Amino acid sequence: MDALSFRVKAIERLSKNSQLAYAQAEHIHKEVLKPGGHWTPEECAARQRVAMVVPYRNREDHLRIFVSYMHRFMQAQYLEYQIFVVEQASPDVFNRAALMNIGFLEALKLHDFDCFIFHDVDLLPLDTRQPYTCFQAPTHLGAYMSKFSYQMPYDGFFGGAVALSTENIKQMNGFSNLFYGWGGEDDDTLNRVLWRNLTVHRHAQDIGKSYMIKHEKDEGNPTNPNRGIGHEMKPDQYNRNGINSIKYIKQSTDLNVLYTRVLVSIGEN
Ligand code: UDH
Ligand code: MN
């Protein structure tokens, strides 16, 4: 069996009993993690402080698998990091990019992070040689997913997982708050990168592969009919729609052993 199939098998085994995997991960990591799933390497000074932000709702099984898996992966990177799960309490239709904006603002209230990784909860990187860190250029970490036979599904794909420096996110005014439902917000994010004359970096395909846990379409995340270019994607509005315009109410913050859970309602009262 090659290394890739071996890792995929390991994930499938872990997925069969996510409760057990989660309990074991808590047991293994609780001595070394600070509350909220925050890790600082002891043997060296961390090169970057990384906040991993996961837009989330109603995927408990995926979440247990993700946090059980991700700590070991991140610790191999010798970075300071913390995992934030930003959960949408309302409205009914999911808004992935708005949750990413909220994660950015809430994480910075806790620590001075210089790098953000925005990551789907069902996506697991397969090779620790892929750097989970920020570069000068916005970096697409989720380019080669099992879902698409480890190929880019289309040119300009920017979905699944991206790493952006705090500085780049501020330049881009974060992400759009207007994409309700599935699709388009990742394409809009790439458009913001280009709007700021930034380029995109992708790691080589042999180290850049990730496994997406198989799942059905979620209730509350219908395909957005306006996901295509020319609808919500409005560069002339990027200065007005993003981290500077997001409205939300924070319901709670829980510092769990393996992650910080932030429950939010998007929009005004
Ligand atoms: N999510 C939830 N709950 C939901 C819906 C979405 O937690 O009800 C989060 C979760 O982190 C998930 C992510 O949003 O991993 C993305 O949603 P998805 O898993 O339904 O997306 P998909 O499997 O993968 O379609 C996205 C890659 C292809 C996108 C191409 C469009 N430009
Ligand atoms: Mn998915």
Image (cartoon, rainbow, N blue to C red):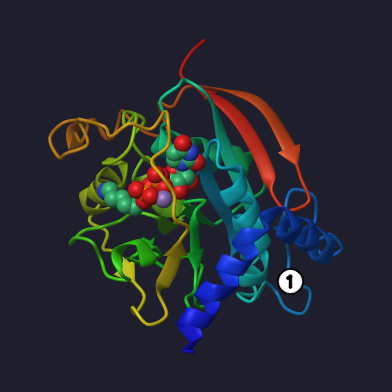
Q: Nearer the viewer, residue 131 or 136?
A: 131
Q: Is residue 184 visible?
A: yes
**Which residue sits at x=77%, y=79%?**
43
Give the percent coordinates (x, y) of residue 83.
63, 52
Say which quarter of the image contains residue 13.
Answer: bottom right
Using the image, determine if residue 252 lies above or below residue 116. above
Give the percent coordinates (x, y) of residue 112.
63, 51
**Residue placed under numbered mark 1 in the picture:** 41
**Which residue sits at x=42%, y=28%?**
220
Q: Nearer the viewer, residue 265 or 145?
A: 145
User: Where in the image, quadrant-wise, is ligand 1 located?
Assistant: top left
Using the image, determine if residue 103 lies above or below residue 65. above
Question: Seen from this angle, which residue lies furthest front?
Answer: 16
Say which quarter of the image contains residue 229.
Answer: top left
Label 1 within 8 A of ligand 1 by Cβ: no
Task: Give the secondary structure at mark 1.
Answer: loop
**Which residue sits at x=64%, y=76%?**
76
**Which residue sits at x=64%, y=65%?**
14
